[in-house]
């Protein structure tokens, strides 16, 4: 047989459930509103070719050549090619240093130095 104090503790805990659930729902709704605000502030991830060309500061034909040569990542959305901005990344200092070292070691760079 159950002790009456244990039973009272259980009933008290059960009585708190609706208030705790309401508090959790408020927190979830606040988080949902925050996420919607963040998503609204972020630019769209998939850009049209003209929009991507404007962002990169190149002509539309150049952007089309880059898409055809697969120099930029693309996705197809309803039979329209879009540039996937989420898969693009900038060049960091380490990558610049590595490419500069590769360029210095290339035969064309050595030939240019010898001709000076």
Image (cartoon, helix red, strand yellow):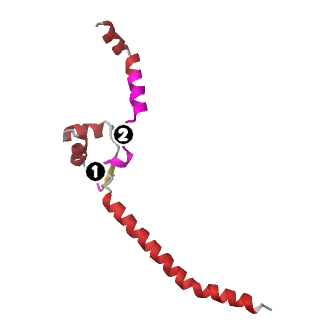
Instruction: Indicate which disc residue 18 carries.
Output: none
Camera-side residue: 111 or 12? Answer: 12
7 with respect to 101 (left or right): right
Residue at 31 percent of width and 36 percent of height: 69
Instruction: Indicate which disc residue 90 carries.
Output: 2
Residue 44, x across and y down, in percent: 31, 55
Magenta-colored span: 78-101
Q: In which quarter of the image is residue 41?
A: bottom left
Q: Residue furthest front?
A: 5
107 shown above or below 44: above
Residue at 34 percent of width and 64 percent of height: 37
Mark closer to the chain start, 2 or 1 = 1
Q: Is residue 81 magenta?
A: yes
Camera-side residue: 73 or 52? Answer: 52
67 with respect to 107 (left or right): left
Residue 22, x across and y down, in percent: 49, 81
Q: Residues within 10 Å of mark 1 (few under 14, many from 20)?
A: some
Residue at 36 percent of width and 66 percent of height: 36
User: Residue at label 1?
Assistant: 47
9 with respect to 24 (left or right): right
């Amino acid at each position: 047989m159950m002790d009456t104090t244990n039973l009272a503790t259980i009933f008290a805990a059960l009585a708190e459930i609706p208030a705790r659930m309401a508090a959790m729902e408020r927190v979830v709704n606040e988080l949902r509103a925050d996420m919607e605000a963040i998503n609204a502030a972020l630019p769209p991830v998939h850009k049209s070719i003209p929009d991507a060309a404007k962002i990169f500061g190149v002509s539309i034909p150049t952007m089309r050549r880059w898409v055809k040569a697969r120099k930029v990542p693309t996705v197809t959305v309803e039979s329209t090619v879009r540039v996937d901005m989420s898969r693009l990344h900038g060049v960091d200092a380490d990558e610049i240093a590595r490419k500069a070292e590769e360029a210095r070691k290339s035969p064309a760079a050595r030939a240019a130095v010898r001709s000076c």
